[in-house]
Image (tube, grey):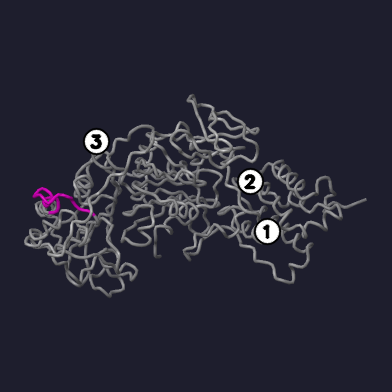
Amino acid sequence: MSHSLLTLFAPPEGFIGDFGMLCGFTASRDVLDRIARRFSGDGSRPRLAAFIHPTADAVTDLPGVAWMHFRSRPPFRLLHAKVALLGFRGRETYLLRLVVSTGNWTAEPLTTSIDMFWCDDFLTGGHDVQLAADIRAADDLFDWLRRRCDDGLLRQTFDGTRPDESFREAVEGLPASTRRPRFVDTRAVNMRSQVIERLTGIGKQCLVIGSGFYEMSDAEEGESLIESLRDELVRSRRLAKDATLDLVLNPDNCQGLHGQAGCLVEKGWTLRPPGSSYAEHKQAKIHAKYLFLAKSADLGEIGPAQMYIGSANFSRMGFESHVDGGGNLEAGIIIVPDPKLSWRRNAKNSIRAMLPGNFEDSVDTNGLLAGEPFVPPLAPPPPPAVAFVEWAGDRLHAPADCEKFVEIKGLNDALVVLPCEWPAPPPAFVTLHPGGWKVPVRADGALVVPKRGRQGLEEILAGVGHFPAGAIGAGDEEEDGEGLDREISGDVIAPMGHGEQAYPIRRMMRLITGLAQAQKYLDPRDWQRWCRELKQDLPALAETEAAMIAPFKDACANPLRALTDAEFLPDGVDESRIKEALEHVEHAWGLAGTQDLWESRP
């Protein structure tokens, strides 16, 4: 399967996105929104927790995304690690996915840069103890981050459960493992030490290093990072003295290497331009960071090999420092490629499909440019006083455990102190003052979802067919537009033919049949959300489908009560919830107090 940044978040067939965490240096609004929608169409609870380097450009107002604000100045120089740990819920099983990326959660990995992604899935009940160790190590990193953030939103219940409840059960249920994790981070130890420690075997004949950023300095100590790494591998006999050495870089943006290139070439390094086996990368720049060590550099099989993939560039702050020493927070993984992969360019199983770099060409050292220096991000405003606010009884108020003074932009943008009046409907987000942070609003045990446009019958039925992967009232608008198929749970309900559209009663029966069939096979864990979304989205049909409802108003006949029949109720659910939701819809449709269509009349 071909992966992109977005497909990494797509649920496997038969699963829906339940809860996940991701961390990174930057995240753009468009891409994070597409990631969230690809993972789950439900914005009524926090589905993704985003730990991003503190920035004034924080994307804090995306439905279903909990932006994790650091309570105080974090201990790292940069949060540069790019990791996602995702949970997908099936009917009877749960799946955990670990993702390690070299790219940020922005448009560049999809458009102008060559990045690398590694992922693997663990299904509950599995026995892959190595992957279990890796997932536990990644979860420990996220736990470390979460302890430094305001996690108030994640500690709430939504429809009766915490957002990460099933996720935590799956992680805690992983099989015990004594394996050393392949997943590494730089909280306490630098990346260099951990990578070298995990490289095994002796006498490797091939070393490839690739990165989009190297040491900025032209000084001799800048060069020694690459050369000292090679020397250490030779001294430990992991690498042969006469090994083939390739260094992949961006010729027009290679930092201090532009002044060191001559020395590196004299010592046996071949400088390679960016490239890959994918046509779309022809003009792209390398952003991936990797180290590849293999037994053979000939055109045959690569033999025993290992590869580091991660966020750490080959710079001192990235590769040779750690958080406790004032460096970046980086993360990566050391994997073992198939030894039968071939160096041949056109081979079906070529290693070149995995390694960003053009190994047919070399770079003229005279044409190298340092490029623009790295500019650290601006410090953000102080963190928000609260991670969310509550709405009930036409009033907004701070969480019950909040002891701080909280001021927001109220109606007409006037500054008001919480608690304050806010007539229904509640807002999805409010803006705090000062700072301008946008925080989500929680009401009736769920996050308020931004109001969607009025939906017609076809859009409602399309949403029902996507539920619970998407919202009932979302129709097909949740697709990300990239042309990639989205795997969903449930059967999509086919659109009605032109002939059928002329018959209001037939249209109503199609709606009731679609709802009843979908409801009957619901997972009880989705019951509260199902009832809530019916209550939110079906009233709009009073305007968009007035002709469909009119015959039932004239006959004082209520077709909705079929949904309360025991035959169409999932086992063990609270029947009062669907009755309360339908009463609201009946009132909106002008059917309050009418006769149940399905009851026999005297």
Q: Please name the residue shown 85% across and 49% down the image.
A: 595
For disc 3, the neighbor class at 10 Å (few under 14, some 14 to 19, many from 20) is some
Q: Residue at x 61, y 62 (%)?
A: 492
Of callouts 2 and 1, the N-terminal one: 1
Residue picked out by circle 2:
527
Q: Earlier in the sequence, mark 2 or mark 3?
A: 3
The N terminus lies in which quarter of the figure? bottom left
Seen from the viewer's position, the closer of residues 504 and 168 is 504
Mark in front: 2 vs 1: 1
Q: Residue 453 at x, y = what percent?
A: 62, 53
Q: Residue pushed farthest right?
A: 602
Q: Which mark is residue 324?
A: 3
Report the Cα–Cα distance between label 2 and label 3.
Answer: 47 Å
Mark 2 crowd level (few <14, some 14–19, many ≥20, 10 Å Cα): many
Q: Amino acid at mark 2?
A: Trp
Q: CA distance from mark 2 to mark 1?
A: 23 Å
3D distance between C-alphas at marks 3 and 1: 57 Å
User: Which image quarter: residue 298?
Assistant: bottom left
Residue under label 1, please give it: 456
Determine whether, in the image, residue 92 is placed left or right of residue 58. right
Identify the amino acid type marked 3.
Asp
Specify the amino acid type for callout 1. Answer: Gly
Query: Does residue 388 lie above or below 130 as drawn?
Result: above
The secondary structure type at the circle numbered 3 is helix
Q: Which residues are magenta?
A: 213-226
Relative placement, left or right, of 280 versus 323 is right
Nearer the observer, disc 3 or disc 1?
1
Relative placement, left or right, of 568 versus 592 is left
Residue 189's spot in the image, x, y percent?
23, 41
Q: Secondary structure at mark 1?
A: loop
Tag nearer the camera, 2 or 3: 3
